[in-house]
Image (spheres, rainbow, N blue to C red):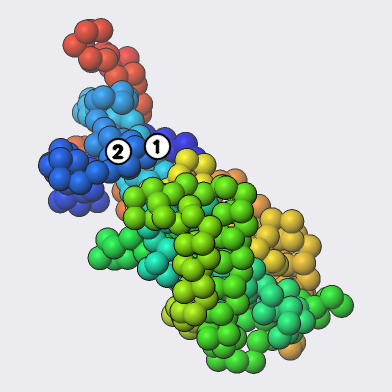
Amino acid sequence: MAIEPCSAQDGQGRPRLEAADIFRAASEAYRDRYAPTPDQRKVMAAIEQCRTAALGGHLDVCKKCGHKAPAYNSCRNRHCPKCQALAQARWIEQRRQRIIPTKYFHVVFTLPEELRTLARVNPKEMYDLVLESAARTLLDFGRSRLHAQLGVTAVLHTWTRELRFHPHAHCIVTAGGLDEQGHWIPARSRFLFPVKAMSRVFRGKLLERLESLHQRKALAFAGRCAELADRAKFDDFKDRLYRKEWVVYAKRPFGGAEHVFQYLGRYTLHVLPAGFVKIRHYGLVAAANVTTKLETARRCLLTPGQDEVPQAPPPETPPSWRDLVLALTGIDLLVCPVCGSRSMERRPLRDSTTGPWPPDTS
């Protein structure tokens, strides 16, 4: 999503140290010591240039007192934490519109350590397996245990807070589903479904898809996983994974589903393959069902005494980037930091090669 450039008012809202400052100070040493992938190098370069003169920009001018301040363009990289603050706010608002009045569960599916080397070599393929296998596991349990269709939002994370490579899927799941007759069937367990049973189904689904990729020669093998190109060694490797217990963790979301969406929305520095979709919706919350099955579920969840069917919030004009900055930081970008009047406007930014600052024409 394209993010408009924005400026920070002096002394307001800006943290003392940002990711870009760290990248500019340490990226050269980091590249010398480690071996970032080409995609990671592109992200690092984008963040280093974000909101600097290298990307151009505009001049913020106060029409009342004449105060001028340059404001440089954003890099618009989807992994940049500064650029994605506005995208995150929009994403959370969109998720709020898909929340129905029921309880939600938070289920985490993790990729075993043995498969992480393969994931480094084949990130898109392995990340797809994690998201799709996790979601299909939940939907299958919904059909077999509740005879109903659940709503599942799956979000891929690739690192832990300690910055260890650890691909896993966070899934926000409705505590119940819609059956074929259009009735709401609530989940009656405190933990949705047994985690051990879910982990074994998840394991089976992922390894079945992994086998298919191997048969189609759709995987690359290099470094420590090079030997897996051999059929016999791959079969032995897969057998060991089938014997291992995989980790699935489930609990009700703390603070409600909206709080979990805010928690998940904060994580943007996961450098993913180009074009990879890290947030996916399944079942009732899939795009094809938002205005049909999801609304039927909303109707079923009427509380006693309600006379009207609660509807999804009507589409509104998307807030401007200035409105989002105000909501996120409390900073009104139209207010002059010098005289306090709400009279800031944009003008073209010129550098030393094209002439002086543009004159005040007001």
Q: Residue at x 67, y 79 (%)?
A: 141
Q: Where residue 78 appears, x then y in whole percent?
A: 42, 43
The answer to whether 35 is drawn above or below residue 244 in the figure is: above
* Extreme-front residue of the structure: 232
Looking at the rendered structure, the kind of residue marked 2 is Arg
Give left or right: position of 143 versus 254.
Answer: right
Q: Where residue 172 appears, x then y in whole percent?
A: 54, 71
The answer to whether 270 is drawn above or below residue 242 in the figure is: above
On residue 41, the disc is 2
Q: Residue at x 31, y 26 (%)?
A: 55
Who is closer to the viewer here, 152 or 90? Answer: 152
The answer to whether 150 is drawn above or below residue 32 in the figure is: below
Looking at the rendered structure, the kind of residue marked 1 is Arg
On residue 76, the disc is 1
Q: Residues within 10 Å of mark 1 (few under 14, many from 20)?
A: many
Q: Give residue 313's quadrant in the image.
A: bottom right
Q: CA distance from mark 1 to mark 2?
A: 15 Å
Disc 2 secondary structure class:
helix
On the question of residue 84 being in view, the answer is no
Give left or right: position of 25 versus 309.
Answer: left
Quadrant of the frame with the C terminus: top left
Q: Where residue 310 appears, x then y in whole percent?
A: 71, 71
Q: How many marks?
A: 2
Q: Residue at x 32, y 65 (%)?
A: 160
Q: Residue at x 42, y 70 (%)?
A: 112
Q: Where residue 76 appears, x then y in whole percent?
A: 40, 37
Sequence-wise, the earlier of marks 1 and 2 is 2
